[in-house]
Each structure stands twice: as C-alpha cells, then as structure tokens.
Image (cartoon, grey):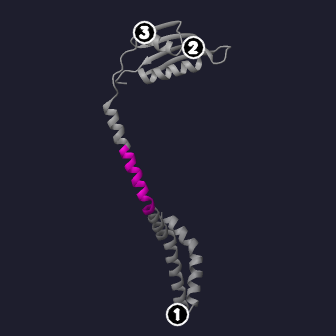
Amino acid sequence: MNRILSALMDRLRGPLQALSSFWEQRDQRERMILSVGIAAIVLALLYLLLIEPAISGRERLEKNLPVLRQQAATFQAQAREAATLAGKGTANVPPITREGIESSLSRRGLRAQNLSVTPDLIRLQLPSASFSEMISWLNEMQKASRVSVVEANVTALDASDTVSATLTLRQQKADQ
C-alpha cells in the first residue's frame, strides 16, 4: 500500500510543483478570483451530477405515483377476487356416462365407432367426422362436464373438413 501511495506521489510531484508555481506567481486578487471560479465550477458539478437528477427523479415519481397507486389498488382488488373465487371452488360435475357421451355426440351429428368409459378416462374413436363439429363437441364437453383432452390422434381424410380421430379424455374432479 505504501509503495502504491509513494509511486502515486512521485507521479503527481511534477504537476503539483507546476500548479504550486503557477499559484505563487498570482497576486492576492487573482488567487481570490480563481478560488471563486473553482468553487463555482465545483458547486455546478455537484448540482448537475447529484442534486438535479435527484430533484427531477422525485418530480417524475410524484407525477407517476397516483397512476401507480391506482394500478396497485386494481391488482389488489383482482387478487382478492381471485382468492374469493378460488375459495368457492366449482360445483361438482356429475361423472360422465357412456349414454351421456353418445347423446352429446349424436346432437352434433357424430358417431363413435369405439367408446370406452372408465372412472378416470374416456376413449373414443371417430372414423369419419366433421373436424369443426368435433372441435365444437370438445368445447361443449369442456364447458359442461370439465373434460380435457389427454391425447388426440387426428388424421385428415380426403373430404373437406373430415377427419379420423382417436381421442382420450379425462374429466377433471372438483379438487383439481
């Protein structure tokens, strides 16, 4: 540490002697003017680098604070609403039956070639079905019976909007 300090002092010795010589050559009035000028420059730098950014930042924050408070209040209200809705849960949906699936398929003009209903999964095969009707049926089943697609294998057929599909569905329980 002392070596670094002494090396720094050796390097600054020349410029400091030049500055000291310059200062000694000035009379009292010039020294006073230079001192006031240096003090003004230092104060201006302090203001520009420290004080002005703090003041402008504070003004910007004061301007944005009402908007931020409104957003925070909105977020808190939404969080309370979400917590309330999560606490209520959803109504229990009765388990899906084979007859219920067959009737909902027939309402859409669809017919399953193979249909297997177990307590956990529903598997069905639609050999030639309208793609748009199948999607509408899945949407209806999702809304009415909380059914989600676990696996889908869909193959387009030659006719427009016609597919061959094998679907595996799962009915979500009330606690999921």
**Which SS class for mark 2?**
strand
Question: Mark on residue 99?
Answer: 3
Seen in the picture, residue 147 relative to 112 is either above or below; the reply is below
Q: Which residues are magenta?
A: 61-77
Give me the residue at 56% from left, 76% from top: 13
In this rendering, which labeled residue sits more in front, label 3 or label 2?
3
Circle 3 packing at 10 Å, graded few (<14), some (14-19), many (20+), is few
Inter-mark Cα distance, 1 to 2: 100 Å
| Residue farthest right in this picture | 158
Q: Nearer the viewer, residue 164 or 10?
A: 164
In this rendering, which labeled residue sits more in front, label 1 or label 3?
3
> Going from the N terminus, do you reach mark 1 or mark 2 first?
1
* Residue type, label 2: Ala
**Which SS class for mark 3?**
helix
Give me the residue at 52% from left, 9% from top: 112
**Which SS class for mark 1?**
helix
* Residue type, label 3: Glu
Q: What residue is pinned by disc 2?
A: 165
Seen in the picture, residue 46 relative to 140 is either above or below; the reply is below
> Going from the N terminus, do you reach mark 1 or mark 3 first?
1
Is 68 part of what is drawn in magenta?
yes
The percent position of residue 50, horizontal first and vertical second, equals 48, 69
Q: What residue is pinned by disc 1?
A: 28
The percent position of residue 46, horizontal first and vertical second, equals 49, 73
Q: Nearer the viewer, residue 106 or 163?
A: 106
